[in-house]
Amino acid sequence: MTIHQLSVFIENKSGTLVKVLKLLKDEGIQLIASTIADTAEYGICRIICSEPARAFEVLKSAGVAVTLTEVFAIELDNMPGRAADAIEIFANEGISIAYLYSFLLAGKGILIFRTDNPVRAVEVINGSGLHAVPEKDLSKLL
Amino acid sequence: MIWNEVKETMSRDEMCELQGRRLHKLVSYVYHNTPFYRRKLQEMDLTPDDIRTIDDIVKLPFTTKQDLRDNYPFGLQAAPQSEIIRIHASSGTTGHPTIVGYTRKDISVWSECMARCLTSYGITRGDIFSVAYGYGLFTGGLGVHYGVENLGAAVLPASTGNTEKHVLLLRDLGATGIACTPSYALHLAETMDRLGISKDSLKLRVGAFGAEPWTENMRAEIEGRLGIKAFNLYGLSEIMGPCVSYECSAQNGSHINEDHYFPEIIDPSTLKPLPVGRQGELVFTTLTKEGLPLIRYRTRDLTSLDDTPCSCGRTSIKMTKVVGRSDDMLIIRGINVFPSQVESVLLDMPECAPYYKLMVDRVDNLDTLTVQVEVRQEYFDQGFDTLTPITELEKRIASRLKNVLSIGSKVQVKAPGSIERSEGKSKFVIDNRILK
């Protein structure tokens, strides 16, 4: 039910982000979404890409501090209020969201999030009619 | 005003003669009472009879903080324990503090020298003088306290902390003088602002400040915000405590109580004495001390001496402002901090690599310490999906550092290899405080 996301630790120094993205580019790996959470000193760059397992190996062997994390990807209709409805469902079930971001892909809204209670999240998704996008389908949408 | 005209305005010849006599007596005293010094002199084939004039001092060996540490706690004490009436302790690099025992005569000399300082600042009987140095193992509080009592002014033993109450007392009692660290003086000023108490409602006239480096800018700010005249007060616990030297109305250097503490300036690398006027490491010999007499004690403070006649009438030699240290000790908010203390904390943490950088800054007149440390590759390689483990590690390091250093610091965790490597340790310390 979950998909793989790359989390890359980046120091706030010019050139570090470029280095990571170039490594993926040289391997023909395509970004689907990315976001950076930052403090004054560092950031975590979170990446959804076309071949996460291979991307992980590429970055790892280049000495990049990278980790592969399982996150949920929920597909939503591209209409106002859908994200609010979805998150309300999780809130009502007492599932807290560690982080969340969203993007549009092939006319669909995709909501990416991580929770500390993935088992319960799966139950809630199954019982609520929300649609979790399988990893292979994400690439197909490209 | 001069407290002791006989000693403070002595001719140079008389002073040298007095110092020579006292040095001879001191060397005989330690030779017969401190096995440590007797052995050192014997190794150099010296006896007390070889030391007759103050110029003979260059024949004598140096004493270092390491010697005090190696002989912890009482190894260098010369007086029998039955003669010791007070013990102070100052912070050390690792574990052992420096222990200083004082005889009744030592306390009397300290109070005499402190009275000279206070008189020079314009304090007399009838003044109410607040001592806002910490009372306790630190020499600042009790050292100044006894001086004020000896002088005959009324001492207000405020100590540090409880600043609001202190401000109210200063106002209500009409206190005229205060001694504290320069940063505490500014903290007082901020507290007054917050309480809406104007400097005009206080009768403060004189401030004596020391125990940490301060600048002319800080002096101007303290004087302006508290409406006082601010004077320098220098001392170190190994030698006595506050009272070793003091500014006069001329405020162009601090007069040394050189009939008790004989100063020399040496080149810290060759250990050769430098002529008056040259900058180097300050060395003191305690000419009259009984409890813990020290011969040619290396203070590690970098400064120079000035023997030009002073407009205040005193003939004693002056030391200029301390411009730095010849070792890696940092004085941050009055607290001695050694990089090795930081290092021992960092190396105790499995996440940390032995690469670190200390940065000392002065923000709004308050010293700040920033510690940057690299994490180990193994720790880093596990990767991070959120910044929480990093910020938690930073908090953990900061809390351990606080326990060891007694001061707070800002900790920044860095990626492996991101801190510049260098040969000398000094490069790991960046002191951005500019002292003028």
Image (cartoon, coloured by chain):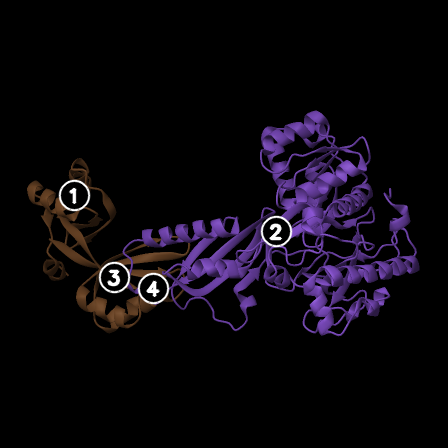
Which one is in front, B273 or B82?
A: B82
Closer to the chain start, of discs 4 and 3, is: 4
Q: Closer to us: mark 2 or mark 4?
A: 2
Q: Residue at x 79, y 38 (%)?
A: B150
Q: Does A98 sit above or below residue B373?
A: above
- The residue to which callout 1 is attached is A79
Residue type indicated by callout 1:
Met
Left or right: B257 in relation to A74: right
Are the residues under badges 1 and 4 in a single subunit? yes
Neighbours of disc 3 within 10 Å: few (<14), some (14-19), many (20+): many
Q: Picture coordinates of residue B283 (x, y %)?
A: 73, 62
**Residue at mark 1 shares a chain with residue at mark 3:** yes
Chain label for disc 4: A
Where is the N terminus of chain B found, in terms of image quarters? top right
Q: How far apart are marks 2 and 4 (CA)?
A: 49 Å
Q: Which residue was labeled with disc 3?
A: A67
Tell us which disc is closer to us: 1 or 4: 4
Q: Residue A17 carries which label?
A: 4
Total labels drawn: 4
- Residues B102 and B167: in front is B102
Write down the chain letter for disc 3. A
